[in-house]
């Protein structure tokens, strides 16, 4: 019995993949579909990609921190999962809250792309080249704080929208530079714009570069169907990073960076918290065995909370 027959036997119609509608989100859904096609010998018509508009996509005139944070990119998609109108949901893991709705789980993650941020400008190659008082656009509190900690002389403006929108704003002169995730640029085929910033200059967001697949917790058929494309190393990295974020109660209101690096059986974790204006930064590096992934991230979060002191996140 081949894989296609078994899937069709359980699903009377194509497997429905839910995603946001941005070009990057659709590219990630298509990558997921492609990996499943290869893993199970299925054709493209065994799947249907369903675009779901989220509140975060619809509200573009205000910072995320003012309208509800990370969940704005997931609520409508998760409602579709719970109602059964989609079978799986594909997400950028950096957009995912650390707490999921009851009945849902992230069962699968794909191999992680480049975790670094890219410096993007039509005139300049590096942050250091930016002239005093230059305008930089970003919607990320983390990137804003990290930039201002290095260059408090720069002016930072809100830069919402998908990759194409932000590139257009650069062309229109709204800002002289911006930051985009290397992973997103690579997945969109915009490799010519990749200009990586070293992680010791700009520590990436927790789970940056990772794609997660969400499903109903009790659907074992879907879980088994997804299992061949699951990437264990990425899962361990995210376990550390998201445990760290959960301990800090991180959201789009808090500038936080975190990255877990795996070397043999050791995890090396870099974490930092910042004041929104970049005036204060606490950072450190921790290490532990692979078996300690969850506790390593949690303990790192506790240590940075102690360093920041009561009221740091208020």
Image: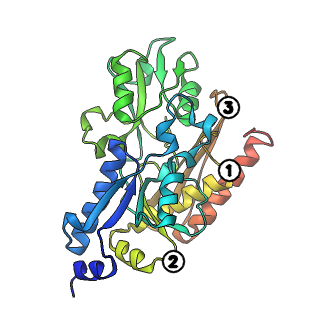
- Of residue 42 and residue 281, the one placed in the foreground of this image is 42
Q: Is residue 223 above or below residue 114?
A: below
Can you identify the residue that label 3 sits on?
Answer: 280
Observer-side mark, 1 or 2, equals 2
Where disc 3 sits, the SS reads loop
At x 59% / y 62%, what residue is drawn?
A: 101
Secondary structure under badge 2?
loop
Real-space CA distance between mark 3 and mark 1, rounded to the nearest whole angstrom: 16 Å
Q: Can you tell which mark lies on residue 218? A: 2
Residue 27, horizontal then vertical, whole percent: 30, 49
In the displayed image of the protein, which residue is found farthest to the top?
132
Kind of element beneath mark 1:
loop
Disc marking residue 136: none
Q: Position of residue 44 (x, y in %)?
A: 21, 63
Q: Residue 300 sits in which quadrant?
A: bottom right
Location of residue 294 by image quarter: bottom right
């Amino acid at each position: 019995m081949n894989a296609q027959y078994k899937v069709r036997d359980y699903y009377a119609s194509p497997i429905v993949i839910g995603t946001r509608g941005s070009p990057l989100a659709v590219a990630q859904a298509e990558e997921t579909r492609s990996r499943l096609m290869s893993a199970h010998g299925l054709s493209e018509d065994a799947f249907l990609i369903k675009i779901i508009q989220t509140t975060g996509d619809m509200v573009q005139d205000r910072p995320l921190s003012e309208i509800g944070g990370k969940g704005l990119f997931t609520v409508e998609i998760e409602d579709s999962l719970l109602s059964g109108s989609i079978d799986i949901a594909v997400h950028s893991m950096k957009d995912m809250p650390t707490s999921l709705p009851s009945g849902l789980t992230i069962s699968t993650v794909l191999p992680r792309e480049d975790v670094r941020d890219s410096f993007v400008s039509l005139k300049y190659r590096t942050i250091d080249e930016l002239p005093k008082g230059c305008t930089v656009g970003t919607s990320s509190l983390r990137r804003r704080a990290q930039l201002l900690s290095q260059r408090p002389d720069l002016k930072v403006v809100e830069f919402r929208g998908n990759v194409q929108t932000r590139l257009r704003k650069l062309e229109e002169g709204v800002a002289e530079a911006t930051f985009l995730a290397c992973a997103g640029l690579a997945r969109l085929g915009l490799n010519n714009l990749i200009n990586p910033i070293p992680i010791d200059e700009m520590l990436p967001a927790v789970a940056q570069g990772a794609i997660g697949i969400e499903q109903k917790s009790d659907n074992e058929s879907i879980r088994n169907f997804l299992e061949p494309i699951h990437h264990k190393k990425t899962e361990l990295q995210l376990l550390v990073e998201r445990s760290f974020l959960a301990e800090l109660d991180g959201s789009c209101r808090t500038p936080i960076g975190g990255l877990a690096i795996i070397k043999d059986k050791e995890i090396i974790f870099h974490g930092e918290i910042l004041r929104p204006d970049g005036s204060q930064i606490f950072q450190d590096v921790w290490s532990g065995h692979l078996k300690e992934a969850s506790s390593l991230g949690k303990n790192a979060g506790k240590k940075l909370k102690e360093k920041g002191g009561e009221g740091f996140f208020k």
